Amino acid sequence: MLTWAKMPVFKIHRQRESAKSSFRFAPHTSGAAVVKQKDYELSGEKEAASAYALFNSLRGTEEALEVGDVVELPDGALKIYKYVGLEDASWWVPVVAPPPTEAAAASPAS
């Protein structure tokens, strides 16, 4: 009896129109890109053997990836489609300032 391994499922996050022009005209930077979730909307999920297999299967279709779109891998890692191909990316996480300590709050301001 044959058993087929299930193909990985990738989430596709499309860049919102409002963010496309600033991304497309920005200079290319090397290294992992940091992207804001507010600039993207989840457009669906697709099965593929790899992120590049997904890219190739969509190429030439109405669902083709556009520059700036993000592919979320099954393990949660992100790949962003740039002019040079798929590169590593991560969601931007705001830095939260720690609450002031009691000693800092009690001391008078200089």
Image: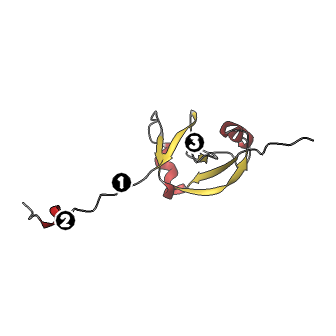
Q: Name the image quarter holding the C terminus.
A: bottom left
- Nearest to viewer (mark 1 / mark 2): 2
Tell me the crowding category of disc 3: few under 14, some 14 to 19, or many 20 or more residues within 10 angstroms, Cα based.
many
First in sequence: mark 1 vs mark 2: 1
Disc 3 to disc 2, how far (Cα)?
A: 43 Å
Kind of residue at badge 3: Lys
Residue in the picture at 70% in, 41% down? 54
| Left or right placement of residue 84 versus residue 25 in this view | right
Picture residue at 43% right of the left edge, 53% below the top: 93
- Secondary-structure class at tag 1: loop
Q: Which mark is residue 79?
A: 3
Q: Quadrant of residue 94?
A: bottom left
Disc 1/disc 2 C-alpha distance (Å):
21 Å
Label 2 sits on a secondary structure element that is: helix
Cα separation between marks 1 and 3: 23 Å
Task: Mark 3 vs mark 2: give the one in front.
Answer: 2
**Residue 52 left/right relative to 5:** left
